[in-house]
Image: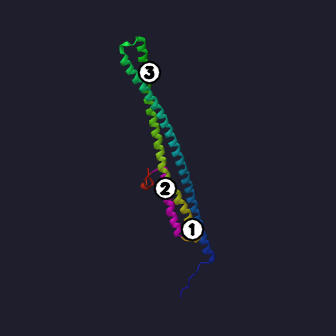
Amino acid sequence: MPEVELPEVEEASEGRDRFGKRVALVTAVYAVILAIASLGGNNAMKEMLLAQQEASNQWAFYQAKASREHQYRIQRLVLEADLLERGDTLKPESRQKLEAALQRFTEEEKRYGEEKKDIEKEARKQEAERDRNQAKDPYFDYAEVLLQIAIVMGAISILSKARLPLYLSLILAVIGAAMTLNGYTLLFRLPFLHAGH
């Protein structure tokens, strides 16, 4: 019968320690990616809220400009009707003053209408920024969850000295890292993350 050499107890212990150290190092990398995902998620949420606030401010400003535009339009229409009705009965000086006022009302109505367009453009730009950050946020959320589970699986692997939890943690971490990257870049969209939007 051939003789079987068994490893020394110290060698086996050293191999397990080396495995535990490697898994701990890999788990530390997961923690770094988790911190990056968390930072991205916090920033996306802040940017989304700021853009929403700015869009709301712009729409309020738009409403104010629209109200002024309508006031000048009403004044212009009333004055036009008054000039038509009173026609030739007006003294030339009175007619000249009314026509000057009519010209001013027309110009102000036009000015407010033009300013309103620029404000609308800025409001829509802020809404697009809000929507972009809103689309990013779920990727960071899912990345954080997957990376936290990967860290736990890494710890289980160290404690149990088993490789299966390590492999599961690697798969989860890769998916979490991809979700983190996508949170920053929006290279792809997962329909189930955008169903309510």
Q: Which numbered marker is on residue 104?
A: 3
Q: Across the whole image, how many numbered discs are drawn on residues? A: 3
Q: Position of residue 26 (x, y in %)?
A: 56, 62
Q: Are marks 3 and 1 in contact (CB under 8 Å)?
A: no
How crowded pointer 2 is (Cα within 10 Å; few <14, some 14-19, many 20+) is rated as: many
| Picture quadrant where residue 23 is located | bottom right
From this viewpoint, is residue 188 visible? Answer: no
**Residue under the point 43% across and 56% down:** 192
> x, y (%) of residue 138?
49, 53
Of the numbered discs 3 and 1, the one sitting upstream in the chain is: 3
Real-space Cα distance between discs 3 and 2?
58 Å
Q: Which residue is mark 1?
A: 156
* Residue at mark 2: 179
User: For the residue marked with disc 3, what is the amino acid?
Assistant: Arg
The residue positioned 40% from the left and 11% from the top of the image is 92
Element type at mark 2: helix
Q: Majority secondary structure of the magenta segment? A: helix
| Mark 3 → mark 1, Cα distance in angstroms | 78 Å
Residue 90 image offset from top left, x and y in percent:
39, 13
Residue situated in front as seen by the camera: 77 or 180: 77
For the record, the magenta segment spans 163-186
The mark nearer the N terminus, 3 or 2, is 3
Q: Are marks 2 and 1 in contact (CB under 8 Å)?
A: no
Can you tell which quarter of the image residue 161 is in?
A: bottom right
Looking at the image, which residue is at 42% across and 54% down? 191
Q: Earlier in the sequence, mark 2 or mark 1?
A: 1
- Residue 16, given in percent of the width and then of the height, sits at 59, 71
Front residue (pair 156, 26): 156
| Disc 1 element | helix
